[in-house]
Each structure stands twice: as C-alpha cells, then as structure tokens.
Image (spheres, rainbow, N blue to C red):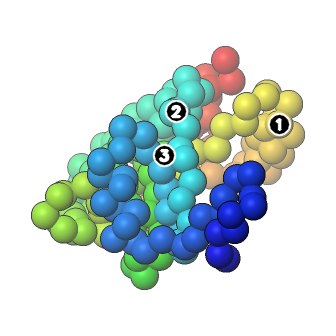
C-alpha cells in the first residue's frame, strides 16, 4: 500500500509493534494496534464505567481467594503473539503479572479479558440484553469458582 502524491488523504502503511509502542507511550491519547494498523480509542462513557464497577464489585472477593486481581481499562494488554495491543474494559491477572519491558505498562499474561460493550443508543443494545437475560446467560470463570448472571453486571448501566 504505497502513498501516492495525488491523493487528498494519504494511505498509511503498516507499522511495527515497536513503532506503535514508541508512539503510544509519547501520545496523550490512547490507541490500539492490530496486525500493523492503529485505531484511536475513545474515552469510557458513564455506562461503561458503571458496568466495569459492577463487574469489579461482584467478582472482587472471589479474586482475593485465588491470588488474582482485577484491573480496569487503563492498562494495555498484548496478545501472546504480540500482533495486537489493546485496552480492554477490565482484566484479571492471577499470580505474578508479566510485563512487556522495563516500562511496566503492558500486561502479557491476563487470565481473563473483559471487553465491555455499551451501545451508543439504548435501542442498539436492548434486544441483545433482553435476549441474554431471557436465556439466563451468565459469566462463569471456573478457575475462581465464580458465576454471575449478566443482568447483575449490567444492572444500573442503562441510564
């Protein structure tokens, strides 16, 4: 994908993970990296934060018993193949955290990654949530003996 001089908006070529990390660490804004391409990350909404807080409060005491901790969206996570870097809604890390390098800002060993999906419009998510609740879907993490109905996590986030 070469840049052409006659284009109004240039096409940007693939960047390496080291280029991404260098740029990301200097930037005041967050972005995520997936297989060479970078996407800006928007700030969390009130609904997102309520959902993350509900999740943390429901799961917290289970984590203490399992030598695990839960962290919310400020910590970057890398996939095992290092082909993507993301800021998930929350992560659980069990045992000693492994970090990418001496910057201590990228997890390599999350045990669980939560991506919190909150629609911009209530109509976008209502049918999905109604379907999940009607089917009694639940979050289940067997390693820490945790089960919780999704309805309990999203309770109060539909402001």
Judging from the image, what secondary structure is the residue with disc 2 in?
A: loop
Point out residue 126 in the picture as x, y percentages from the top left corner.
82, 34
Which residue is nearer to you in this view: 81 or 117?
81
Q: Earlier in the sequence, mark 2 or mark 3?
A: 2
Distance of mark 1 from mark 3, alpha carbons? 19 Å
Q: Nearer the viewer, mark 1 or mark 2?
A: 2
Question: Are the two marked residues, 2 and 3, in contact with CB atoms closer than 8 angstroms?
Answer: yes
Q: Quadrant of the N terminus?
A: bottom right
Q: Earlier in the sequence, mark 1 or mark 3?
A: 3
Question: What residue is shown with label 2?
Answer: 44
Point out residue 103 in the picture as x, y percentages from the top left corner.
17, 58
Question: Which residue is painted at 18% across and 57% down in the image?
Answer: 104
Point out residue 131 in the picture as x, y percentages from the top left corner.
83, 46
Judging from the image, what secondary structure is the residue with disc 3 in?
A: loop
Q: Is residue 18 above or below residue 116?
A: below
Question: Which residue is painted at 79% across and 28% down in the image?
Answer: 121
Which residue is nearer to you in this view: 4 or 60?
4
Question: Which residue is painted at 48% across and 46% down in the image?
Answer: 89
Question: What residue is shown with label 1?
Answer: 124
Determine whether, in the image, residue 20 is placed left or right of residue 89.
left
Question: Are the two marked residues, 1 and 2, in contact with CB atoms closer than 8 angstroms?
Answer: no
Determine whether, in the image, residue 66 is placed left or right of residue 119.
left
Question: What residue is shown with label 3?
Answer: 89
Which residue is nearer to you in this view: 19 or 94?
19
Question: Which residue is painted at 52% across and 33% down in the image?
Answer: 44
Q: Quadrant of the C terminus?
A: top right
């Amino acid at each position: 994908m070469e840049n052409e001089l006659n284009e109004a908006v240039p096409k940007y070529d693939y960047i390496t993970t080291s280029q991404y990390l260098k740029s990301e660490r200097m930037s005041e804004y967050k972005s995520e990296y997936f297989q060479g391409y970078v996407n800006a990350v928007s700030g969390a909404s009130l609904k997102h934060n309520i959902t993350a807080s509900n999740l943390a409060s429901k799961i917290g005491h289970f984590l203490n018993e399992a030598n695990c901790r839960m962290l919310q969206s400020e910590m970057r996570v890398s996939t095992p193949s290092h082909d993507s870097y993301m800021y998930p809604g929350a992560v659980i890390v069990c045992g000693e955290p492994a970090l990418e390098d001496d910057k201590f800002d990228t997890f390599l060993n999350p045990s669980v990654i939560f991506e919190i999906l909150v629609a911009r419009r209530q109509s976008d998510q209502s049918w999905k949530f109604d379907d999940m609740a009607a089917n009694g879907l639940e979050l289940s993490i067997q390693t820490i003996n945790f089960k919780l109905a999704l309805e309990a996590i999203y309770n109060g986030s539909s402001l």
